[in-house]
Amino acid sequence: MSATTTRELVEIDERRLLRRLDDLAQRGALAQGGIYRALYSPAWSSAMELVAGWLKEAGLFVRRDAVGNVWGRIEGSRGGRAIVTGSHIDTVRGGGALDGALGVVAGIEAVTSLWDRFGRSTRILECVAICEEEGSRFNTNFWGARAIADRLEPGEADRVRDADGMTLAEAMRSVGLDPATAAGAVRRDIDVFVELHVEQGPILEDHGPRLGVVTTIAGTAHLEVTVRGQPDHAGAMAMTRRRDALLGASAMTLAIAETAVRMGHPAVATVGTIAVEPAQVNVVPGIARFTVDARHTDPARRTELLTQIGDACKAIARERKLDVEIRTLRDRPPVTLSPRIADVLRRACLAAGMEPRDMTSGAGHDAQVLTAAANVGMLFVPSIGGRSHCPDEATTADDVVLGTRALATALRELAYQM
Ligand SMILES: [Zn+2]
């Protein structure tokens, strides 16, 4: 097929797709609502078994790699570098049924439908359930995609621990994986990676259309801000003489949010954690320590956002006679996805009768890590109310089906070309 041919939308099995999403949502379902599938936990293993079963049922060649990513493969008649689709199987604590799961289940549905309808592909076609993306159990993230892209750090599995003190390496052994062989997960033969994901924000729902093609993924910076004042007696020290670290941190929190609001979309800044010392009911806080998550898709604007946040904190500290120290915990630059794959996705959306919206992603994704190993494209479907990382995360069945058909159509162009 040439790029100019009008493509027809690939049919999928809608009922199987929706039923499987429901089935996967039972793995790791919490009594109080929401889902938690932590890396290498029993819920995670159970979800991976379910996925492997679907891949086997489809007649694909199934394997688990050295870090536990599960792959299903169609050997292309002409070999070459692989066309891959998928997403992550893990969730945040109390997460929803679609973040990651949609890309896994839709990927399997798309590849299975292509295999059933058109037989063997010309290119190698694979779907993958990536073992971890969220960083919700261990203080590390993109574990699965980084293993594929050869971006694991030496000794990382022995260094990082979960809240119970178990190392990532020990957790790997508990599910029959050998941390010493983690490098075996590296793939140098992937040509294309395409990920379908829920938007996790409100743009598609508020402004339409129902499909978005991601062009850029925002760069994330994590800062740790430590504000030092003076601990004093909560009863005896006059209000006017205090150097209350928490009041300073509170003013900074407001100023940080205002900085992002002033800069405008897609700038975002979030204070997500805060701790005070000595943390006693009758003591004026002497130290307040909080984190900032700041993101922008434009490298220069992101730097500007970080500078303005730093300046705002310093000005407030000066006014209130406090000391402030800002430490960078993480600094990931924005990532541009492949224009060629974006075009393939646009054509697939047009086949679905829809001109897609070009979008930036504020959230991080496996796709951004895999740009180190492949040409990457990403397709978004709407999130109801823009909600994600919560039990209410949802997308209409029509949009789930539409996104999956568009994905299958794109994969057909990529993997079935003569
Ligand atoms: Zn995700």
Image (tube, rainbow, N blue to C red):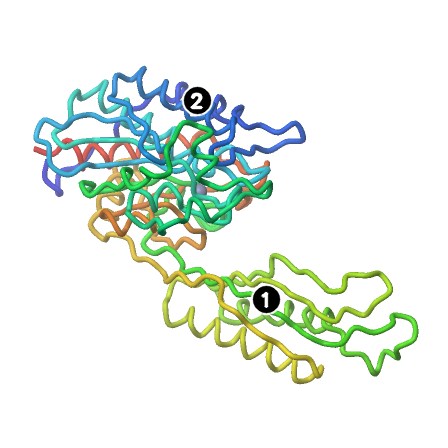
Q: Nearer the viewer, residue 150 or 292?
A: 150
What residue sits right under mark 2 in the picture? Answer: 20
Residue for point 29% across, 40% down: 349
Q: Residue furthest right?
A: 236
Quarter of the image where one finds residue 166: top right
Q: Earlier in the sequence, mark 2 or mark 1?
A: 2
Residue 4 x %, y %: 12, 42
Local crowd size for mark 2, using a 10 Å CA cut-off: few (<14), some (14–19), many (≥20)? many
Per the image, the residue denoted by label 1 is 257
Would the CB of label 1 be found within 8 Å of ligand 1? no
| Element on which disc 1 rests | helix
Residue 226 got which mark? none
Name the residue: 43% across, 22% down: 20
Q: Quadrant of residue 271?
A: bottom right
Mark 1 burial class by Cα count in 10 Å: few <14, some 14-19, many 20+ = some
Quarter of the rendered structure image containing ligand 1: top left
Above-or-below relation of 112 to 360:
above
Question: Residue 51: x percent and y percent?
Answer: 39, 24
The answer to whether residue 173 is above or below residue 14 is: below
- What residue is rendered at 60% in x and 33% in y? 34
**Percent of width and height locating residue 221:** 46, 63
Amino acid type indicated by mark 1: Ala
Q: Nearer the viewer, residue 73 or 411?
A: 73
405 over 350 or under it: above or below? above
Q: Nearer the viewer, residue 215 or 162?
A: 162
